[in-house]
Image (cartoon, helix red, strand yellow):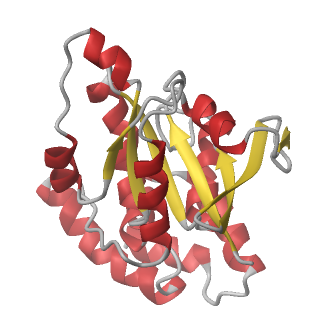
Amino acid sequence: MKSYRIALAGNPNTGKSTLFNALTGLRQHTGNWPGKTVAHAEGTFTHLNQAYTLVDLPGTYSLYSNSADEEVARDYIIFERPDVTIVVLDATAMERNLNLALQVLEMTDRVIVCINLIDEANRKGISIDHTVLSRQLGVPVVKISARNKVGFDTLLNTVDQMVKGKIQTAPYQIQYTDKLEENIKKVEPMVREWLGDSFPTRWIALRLLDGDDIFIQSLKQRVKAHGKGGSLHDFKFSIQS
């Protein structure tokens, strides 16, 4: 039986690990990511007779190259291409948490936004219209309480529909300054010519324009491992010129 891979992303203290533990129970193992001193947790669960492998990514506030945790989470989403990435948000701190969600939406269209701690939000008088938020973000939004296992059926049924191709998404894309958007339009076709459609070309164009050397090195290693043509040196030179 095919096992779909689901990544869990989110800020620290959003209840992401609580959700991971509730879904996988004793069917999990931990270790370190290859070459990193960063904890790795992976487990399995089944839903509607379908097997899933759940990967708990390090809790991060962004997906740039500021820390080993961020690099691990970013590289997994970009290079391992999970079938679904669930972004776990804290219902009581939506504004802060949405920053990470918007970054993930730039990287993959197979996203479910999971708003956790709705019980805490209710106690604080916070109301979240997940339907409106879903329409604005262009991906499914589900409200849960991982601690009390509320909303799990809705979340897992949404995962099931997404892996089966029954949900079409149109992720919200941040619009940057006119100058940056102009540069993205120049660079993105070169990225697509170099890498094809295997990776999110707009997001990679942004990282190249940012001069994110750590990510560029990771990308170079992956491209070499997969036997892609072209020279990264030539590619960077063409951007600068």
Q: Quadrant of residue 230?
A: bottom right
Q: Residue at x 57, y 58 (%)?
A: 77
Q: Is residue 138 left or right of residue 220?
A: left
Q: Is residue 66 above or below residue 122?
A: below
* Residue 210 image position (x, y, % from top left): 41, 52
Q: Residue at 73% across / 68% down in the picture? A: 221
Q: Nearer the viewer, residue 86 or 184?
A: 86
**Horizontal relation, residue 39 to residue 82: left or right:** right
Residue 32: % across, % down = 84, 41
Q: Position of residue 41 (x, y in %)?
A: 76, 41
Please tell me which residue is depicted at 45% across the width and 45% down the height of the picture. 87
Count of picture labels: 0
Nearest the viewer among 183 and 42 is 42
Quarter placement of the N terminus: bottom right
Q: Residue furthest top?
A: 124
On screen, residue 143 versus residue 235, left or right, reads left
Q: Is residue 209 visible?
A: no
In the rendered image, is residue 89 in sight?
Answer: yes
In the figure, 39 relative to 4: above or below?
A: above
Query: x%, y% of residue 99?
Result: 34, 37
Indicate whether 8 appears above or below 1: above
* Quarter of the figure with the C terminus: bottom left
Task: Answer with left or right where residue 124 lies relative to residue 117.
Answer: left
Q: Residue at x 49, y 66 (%)?
A: 160
